[in-house]
Amino acid sequence: MNLEGEQMRVGILGATGYSGAVLFSLLTQHPQITKIDLYGHANREPDRRRSLVDEVPAYSNIHAQLLPFIPQTIMETDDCLFCATPAGITKDLMEPFIAQNFPVIDLSGDYRLKDPLQYKKWYHKEPPAEQLLTKADYGLSEFLNHPKNYIANPGCYATATLLGLAPLVLEKLLEPDSIIVDAKSGVSGAGKKLQPSNQYTFINENAFLYKINEHQHIPEIMQQLHKWDPTIPTIHFTTTLIPVTRGIMATIYAKAAPQISVAKIQEAYLHSYSHSPFVRLRNETFPTIQDVKGSNYCDIGFNYNPQTNVVTVVAVIDNLLKGAAGQAVQNFNKLYGFEETTGLPALPSFP
Amino acid sequence: MNLEGEQMRVGILGATGYSGAVLFSLLTQHPQITKIDLYGHANREPDRRRSLVDEVPAYSNIHAQLLPFIPQTIMETDDCLFCATPAGITKDLMEPFIAQNFPVIDLSGDYRLKDPLQYKKWYHKEPPAEQLLTKADYGLSEFLNHPKNYIANPGCYATATLLGLAPLVLEKLLEPDSIIVDAKSGVSGAGKKLQPSNQYTFINENAFLYKINEHQHIPEIMQQLHKWDPTIPTIHFTTTLIPVTRGIMATIYAKAAPQISVAKIQEAYLHSYSHSPFVRLRNETFPTIQDVKGSNYCDIGFNYNPQTNVVTVVAVIDNLLKGAAGQAVQNFNKLYGFEETTGLPALPSFP
Amino acid sequence: MNLEGEQMRVGILGATGYSGAVLFSLLTQHPQITKIDLYGHANREPDRRRSLVDEVPAYSNIHAQLLPFIPQTIMETDDCLFCATPAGITKDLMEPFIAQNFPVIDLSGDYRLKDPLQYKKWYHKEPPAEQLLTKADYGLSEFLNHPKNYIANPGCYATATLLGLAPLVLEKLLEPDSIIVDAKSGVSGAGKKLQPSNQYTFINENAFLYKINEHQHIPEIMQQLHKWDPTIPTIHFTTTLIPVTRGIMATIYAKAAPQISVAKIQEAYLHSYSHSPFVRLRNETFPTIQDVKGSNYCDIGFNYNPQTNVVTVVAVIDNLLKGAAGQAVQNFNKLYGFEETTGLPALPSFP
Amino acid sequence: MNLEGEQMRVGILGATGYSGAVLFSLLTQHPQITKIDLYGHANREPDRRRSLVDEVPAYSNIHAQLLPFIPQTIMETDDCLFCATPAGITKDLMEPFIAQNFPVIDLSGDYRLKDPLQYKKWYHKEPPAEQLLTKADYGLSEFLNHPKNYIANPGCYATATLLGLAPLVLEKLLEPDSIIVDAKSGVSGAGKKLQPSNQYTFINENAFLYKINEHQHIPEIMQQLHKWDPTIPTIHFTTTLIPVTRGIMATIYAKAAPQISVAKIQEAYLHSYSHSPFVRLRNETFPTIQDVKGSNYCDIGFNYNPQTNVVTVVAVIDNLLKGAAGQAVQNFNKLYGFEETTGLPALPSFP
């Protein structure tokens, strides 16, 4: 599409949520983008103009009002739309853009699953029409080539889990029915909505499991895993909330396939990721959540225990960067042929 | 031994560490104890009298000096000794007490393992003599009956893991070679020693795995599991540090044995724990770390996922109470025939 | 009133909030109390019986239902009522008890101020009738003697500030118009109500001032200060929320009166508090919030800087203990002539 | 000096500390800088080459070794040196650079004070020679014009306090002897050195004052205030550590001078900062620490309470950005005539 060097104008729908706000911050630093338009979707406070700073006081030097969401106007004004509205709401809002094959990076879950029945089962909502779903590409950046104009950005848990599993699944180094994922997440993943489980007094000095066997990222993980190895029956996947604002750690356990060796595992990871600037491998140690905070990196470490014949993989990401807004920018770069790292931070935030 | 109603005088060796300080606090509230003597072990600052408050400023209303550690004097003065010194140091210090069959509750790891070779392998230190080891009972309170005079109090990870697994292992409801434990712990479990991994800037907003396949609580877990089911080859056990001061969550995964059912699992837990005042069962939900903070409870919840055939068990404890000082008092109560709950808090600290 | 040794039955109205839940926990350990009845006030979910554990899952071993709030029945059943309902709601609920001179310890703000106009100004609600207000005693325990049957338990900020200031104000060691209080508080002081300012992502890694010049604890501080020294015009009082669950630190600054000396300050504190078991003085250092966590202590330290002629006083409390439920029990003990420390923890929670 | 557009090569001495690591991260994004050389100072581990990643594991994609510190070589290789070594060590290391008038941005405290006796008094170390001190400019960016080649970057507390006070002091709106600063700081300000007061278990759920009347940033604050108003006798300045990794909040109290008004205060702030891109004013509300996290902004809010005649000013910064590495880059930009904001993040990190 566009050649590098071209200057672009983009829109963000839903910039007041956590992912949207981070996305806005990243795009302001993107050298190929000259203007960012912010849109508020129509069915919320229709008669009052809101500003970004009303909901993100830290951005007090930004004086951007939310423009009304009129798809046709957006398609005439902008070169590309980022959509950071919640699952369930996105579905209808994006129909006109899909119909006209307008470039969209969608951070929600609405167009990730190819099978409408799966969507209905896991999201408990009406799915988009099947022919719309076929127009979207699942945007796990490291495995995305020649994307379609509609990119469904993966979920945060799915990103960490899939990047950690991919090399071992692709090279069939694991027993297919033995995969267990114990994923830990920070609080920002749950969004800004007020709920008892987001309160400081509940989160602080605590840890708890939630959505047991019911997390809506499970089907997108399975959909992608089946592309790589249709023999995997399913995975066991739990989510534990820990008291940090940002970060996901996917700890993956699986029985090793016969004739495995540490060298073979290393090779598999190198084979998959030697050209991936945002995957950093640690063969002998495990990464920490702080290693990737504020960055688009996915750090991956593994260990093979011959006594238990279990391979342990740990993949960590910043859920709002690589797990949401960062990967969205990475996908934007891929869609337009920019260098994959353009506009993304070179280093994590430390300390 | 002593009948209920008798008033006792006890000693604590090592009251300035986290476990020791909590133990002191508990024993001051124990209705059967009239006096507590604090001892400092000899090879540290021999010529200076230290006070408890020097190392625990929060106890500023306590004016207790550390007395010199002279075993014979202790045995003449006190009815029972609690020992909260580190592994490796405890071994020699406790020999005279074992030799004279004097009642000791030992919070360290030195006398937990029956096999000296296992101690050497996991602790990287010289083990106690085998005949001394036979004099000690492994004090997992819920499974301790008619204890010997030397009680080796279990490790914190071991307590949560064993209480979570016991009913399922005893009733053979799990595939023996499939057990994986993903244990999360707060920072106080690592003790007061200054180290980079205890610094606030490293722990805060972070999570990380440590001692991969090398945690010294693994052998005591296996020793106890083998008593219940010798067919278990080993377990896969990882430890992840999370940013809380207190608390352990052991998340246990295992493939279900054939013909399992939720009802059978429930029965197994009820069978094991219906008379255990400090085990609280939650059949349909998982407990949180806050549910047990500041208490001696072990809260256990489970879930069976028929799609993956995996049983998930979550057991949570306060690592300094049920995982250390609280269980020590519980064992003291068992040793002397007091009501098991005597001197222990009735409710967790909330919020 | 009652002699020591008498066994009592008490009620709690509002046990599901933070203060109420802590109060329940304390009262279960109080040796003079044999039974605790829990009441839910009528205008909320009238037709459904609620249990304490529904709102405090950590108390899962307690099977107490909330009884309907019928004042006459309560006065017939219980010897004393603790009221932990919010300001504004308490006012009407307590009228029948005041009318019959029934013993009440009220943790709310409704009966603290003698002047109804002050209540109206600071609480923005209708005040109780003036003749009811005269029936209540302001229960700053260390300065409460021969209390009336209705004790209005002080606010958390007021407790720390007043205990820190009392000796210096009583002995006129400060310039009356120079007092500035920079009070820091943990989050639990704001109660359980869902609000954006209680969310983890907002509180974590943050600090912020709130209720500038408008905190409703200011008038009760002034009311009490004026009893001690009517020449104090007013104090400057700010509140800063810091990311801890529990704890208040009142940092008090004031210009020293002429001829002040460190010795005079020390004497003043000793004079006020040498018989107060819950005030711990630190002359040369300042206390930390952790020093009092989980206890009913108020730790106070001071410093005099001759260069600036400023006295700095730091008073710390656990806002839910000495700042709410703990002081309520202390006042209960005073009302009934029990030892002041009865049923209260002897030591803070450490670490 | 250099014209905009020129590409530069710079060195960092001390990149492994917190400030140095953040500085490195900022400089890698600076469009005018083509190469960054890292130096380790000689008297530490002389014979072993260290890498940045050894001490900052999060920077695992950076393969930079620390070069030996040879001043002459540095002056031949680099265009400018950033020095992030501790106070006391910096003094001698920088002498050759001062002697040759080589451009240096020094983040330490060694060359901030003009009066060697003040240095000796507050730092308890031997001061640099007076003639060297005259070669350095105190680099409070918003008040720095035509800087000398040696810029002593201000301390973090001093930056927040001075920026908060400057307009009111310059326009004589405060009573000179009434200024009290209650400054709160996160833990990273204390650096990486292992000490009990940096341990997680001590910091978490705590707050405490330290260096009472002794903080070494007091004299640099006074030195600068005296430039603005020599009649200020001194200020009262306390520091309270709160459980956050990053951030400083300076809460400033002072009695208002006669005839003050909110409008006059507003004018003073606008007058001082209307051309300062990194000072964001909030007239009616107070900023939070999160408002500036990860940015070079200093957000300032104020309030005037006519009842107490006290002006309250709150200034917040990220101690590692505006309080250290960010201001160093801002000063670098000023020294070389680059746009002040070059290479610095446009928005804070949210959430």
Image (cartoon, coloured by chain):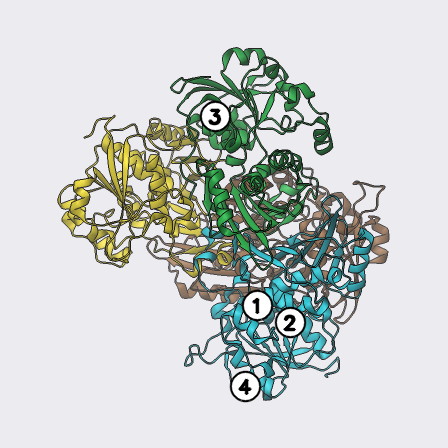
Chain colours: A cyan, B green, C yellow, D brown
Q: What residue sits right under mark 3 in the picture? A: B334
Distance Cα–Cα, label 3 vs label 2: 60 Å
The subunit letter for the residue under badge 1 reads A
Whole-percent x, y for residue B150 in the image:
57, 21
Distance Cα–Cα, label 1 vs label 4: 21 Å
The reply to whether label 2 and label 1 mark residues of one chain is yes
Disc 4 secondary structure class:
helix
Q: Is residue A185 left or right of residue B340?
A: right
Q: Vertically, is C34 above or below D342?
A: above
Whole-percent x, y for residue D301 in the image:
47, 60
Q: Vertically, is C97 above or below A251?
A: above
Disc 3 secondary structure class:
helix
Whole-percent x, y for residue A284 in the image:
76, 49
**What's the amino acid at mark 2?**
Ala
The reply to whether label 4 and label 3 mark residues of one chain is no
Q: Is residue A155 visible?
A: yes
**What's the amino acid at mark 3?**
Lys
Whole-percent x, y for residue B25 in the image:
46, 29
Q: Which mark is residue A328?
A: 2
Q: What residue sits right under mark 1 in the picture? A: A19
The subunit letter for the residue under badge 3 reads B
Could you tell me if the residues under marks 2 and 1 are in contact, i.e. CB atoms within 8 Å? yes
Disc 2 secondary structure class:
helix
